Amino acid sequence: MEQKTLAQDVASMLLEVKAVRLSPDKPFKWASGWNSPIYCDNRITLSYPKVRTAIKNGLAAAVQAYWADVDIIAGVATAGIAQGALVADWLDLPFCYVRPEPKKHGMGNQIEGKIKPGQKVVLIEDLVSTGGSSLKAVEALREAGANVLGMVAIFTYGFDVAVNNFAEKGLKFYTLSNYETLVEEAVKQKYVSESQLITLQEWNRDPAVWGV
């Protein structure tokens, strides 16, 4: 029997609980304005204990494998908060989370939780598209004096723009699964047909102009 990789397992779970929805024939509209045959909401995985635990274990294992000397885990608001807290608890590490921008009231915090200059931080994110929200969090942490080691996320669309953006900021990141693997699993499990696969591959090559 063929042994599934972690990326295949996670992709299969995301499809199973409908955290990822594929609709090549009736595309979704993203907040960015892009038309897309895929919509990903990894928050849904939190409602399924077995899936939630598998993802938590995968994220924690990645942190331990790549950055064993980490001091604190940081979640990227909002979707990375719950995942980050689960990982921090599993690793018995402090936790904080980072807002997209400082609060407009109260203490005006952008980073919620205690973080000290020089601490080694690993970010937890649920999804990587262009990398914009993740890199805003990196910038805020660096401005606070933290040493950001890297980031782990559940899923990436695999866009070149994200790879380039992370490289430009000097940040390494790893994901449990990715678009290519997810689409392969979707075809295997008959979520989509072979003809729809072509549409999904075309979108991933140039999402900004697809369907325009």
Image (cartoon, rainbow, N blue to C red):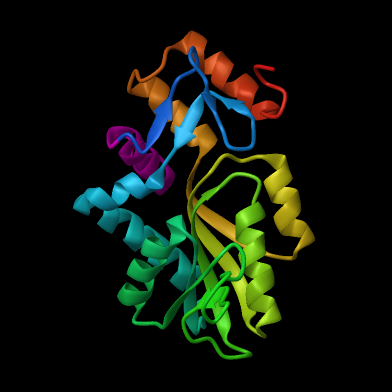
Q: Where is residue 55, by image quadrant?
A: bottom left
Q: Main secondary structure of the magenta part?
A: helix
* Residue at the image position 51 percent from the left and 83 percent from the top: 69
* Residue at the image position 57 percent from the left and 82 percent from the top: 120
Q: Name the image quarter holding the C terminus.
A: top right
User: Residue 9: where, in percent of width, then height?
Assistant: 34, 42
Q: Where is residue 133, by image quadrant?
A: bottom right
User: Residue 54: where, in percent of width, then height?
Assistant: 29, 55
- Please say if 125 is above or below 37: below
Magenta stretch: residue 2 in it? yes
- Residue projecting furthest to the left: 49
Q: Is residue 120 left or right of residue 1?
A: right
Q: Is residue 28 left or right of residue 42?
A: right
Q: Where is residue 100, by image quadrant?
A: bottom right
Magenta region: which residues?
1-17
Q: Nearer the viewer, residue 126 or 158?
A: 126
Q: Nearer the viewer, residue 34 or 109?
A: 109
